[in-house]
C-alpha cells in the first residue's frame, strides 16, 4: 500500500486528534492493542485484566512514514557526515596511524555518548570457559540499533501533524526549515548523520566487532538489535530515569527479544 497521499481528498488538519485517530482506525492504518504499563523498580503481571486498550499506527504505516522522512532529509544527514569528515581530515592530516586511531576513538565515544545521553545503557553477564563471570558493556552500535528501532514510532507520536500532511500527500510541507521546528525530525536527521559517521569510523578502525545497522533509506528497523541471551539494563551515571522505550515498546521488545530466547 502506498501511504503517501492515501487520504489526499480529506482535510485531516480540520479534525481533532481524537477524530483523526478514529478515522485512521476505520481506514485500517491504525489498530487497537492492549497495553500493560511497566513500573521501574516493580513488576506488573502480564494479564489482560491489567491492560488498557490503545490506538497505535500499523507497523507498515510506521515504516512508510519513517522511510519517507529518511529519504526526504537524506541531504541534511549527508551534510552532517561531510562536515564531520571535513574537520576530521584537517585534524588528522600528516599524523601517524596510531595517533589518527586515537583521535577517531575519541570522536567515536563522544558522538555515541552525545546521541545516547540520558538513555538506558545495557551490560551483559557472560560466563567464561573457566566458570568466571564477565561483565561486558553493549557495543555502541547495538545501542544505536535499539534507539533506531524506537524512532519510527516516536515520529508518529511526537509529530501527528506531520503524519497528517504525509497521508494527504502534501510533500511541500516537508521542507528543510521544518527540521528546526519539529524536534523529532531534528533528532532523526542528526541520528542518521552521525550513525553514518560511526559506521565509517568503525569500518576503518574496527572499534566494534559487527553492526546490525546500515544507512540505506529503504532499510526497515530491525526487531532484534541485541542478540546475546543475558542482558541487564543499567542506568547511566547521570541517574536520569528516562528510558529509550515507552511502556508499550518495552513490552514489545521484551517479548520479542528476551522471552523468546529462553524457550
Image: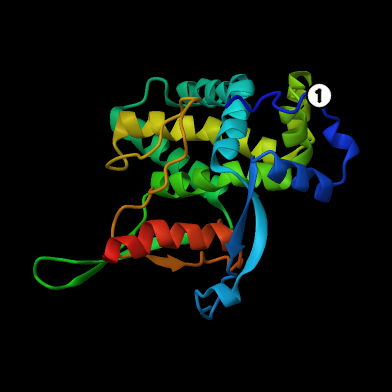
The residue sitting at 76% across, 42% down in the picture is 23
Q: How many marks?
A: 1
Q: Is residue 51 above or below residue 257?
A: below
Q: Quadrant of the N terminus?
A: top right
Can residue 119 be seen here? The reply is: no
Q: Is residue 224 above or below residue 39?
A: above
Look at mark 1 in the image and give the residue it sits on: 9
Q: Is residue 10 left or right of residue 257?
A: right
Q: Quadrant of the C terminus?
A: bottom left
Outermost residue on the left side: it is: 130
Give the structural element (helix, strand or loop) at label 1.
loop
Q: Residues within 10 Å of mark 1 (few under 14, many from 20)?
A: few
On the image, the x and y values in percent for residue 193 come to: 54, 30
Q: Is residue 137 above or below residue 106?
A: below
Residue nearest the observer in this picture, 213 or 65: 65
Outermost residue on the front side: it is: 26
Res 71 → quadrant: top right
Amino acid at each position: 500500500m502506498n501511504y503517501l497521499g492515501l487520504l489526499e481528498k480529506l482535510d485531516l488538519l480540520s479534525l481533532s486528534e481524537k477524530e483523526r485517530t478514529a478515522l485512521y482506525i476505520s481506514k485500517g492504518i491504525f489498530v487497537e492493542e492492549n497495553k500493560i504499563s511497566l513500573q521501574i523498580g516493580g513488576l506488573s503481571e502480564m494479564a489482560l485484566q491489567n491492560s488498557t486498550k490503545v490506538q497505535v499506527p500499523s507497523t507498515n504505516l510506521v515504516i512508510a512514514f519513517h522511510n519517507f522522512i529518511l529519504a526526504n532529509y537524506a541531504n541534511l544527514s549527508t551534510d552532517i557526515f561531510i562536515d564531520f569528515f571535513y574537520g576530521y581530515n584537517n585534524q588528522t592530516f600528516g599524523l601517524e596511524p596510531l595517533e589518527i586511531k586515537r583521535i577517531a576513538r575519541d570522536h567515536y565515544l563522544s558522538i555515541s555518548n552525545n546521541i545516547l545521553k540520558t538513555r538506558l545503557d545495557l551490560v551483559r553477564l557472560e560466563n567464561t570457559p573457566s566458570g568466571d563471570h564477565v561483565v561486558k558493556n553493549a557495543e555502541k552500535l547495538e545501542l544505536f540499533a535499539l534507539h533506531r528501532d524506537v524512532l519510527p514510532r516516536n515520529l508518529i507520536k511526537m509529530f501527528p501533524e506531520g503524519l497528517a500532511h504525509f497521508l494527504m500527500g502534501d510533500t511541500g510541507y516537508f521542507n528543510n526549515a521544518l527540521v528546526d521546528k519539529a524536534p523529532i525530525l531534528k533528532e532523526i536527521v542528526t541520528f542518521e548523520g552521525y550513525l553514518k559517521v560511526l559506521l565509517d569510523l568503525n569500518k576503518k578502525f574496527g572499534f566494534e566487532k559487527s553492526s546490525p545497522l546500515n544507512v540505506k533509506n529503504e532499510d526497515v528497523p530491525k526487531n532484534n538489535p541485541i542478540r546475546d541471551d543475558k542482558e541487564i539494563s543499567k542506568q547511566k551515571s547521570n541517574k536520569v530515569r528516562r528510558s529509550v522505550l515507552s511502556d508499550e515498546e518495552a513490552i514489545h521488545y521484551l517479548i520479542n527479544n528476551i522471552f523468546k530466547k529462553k524457550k
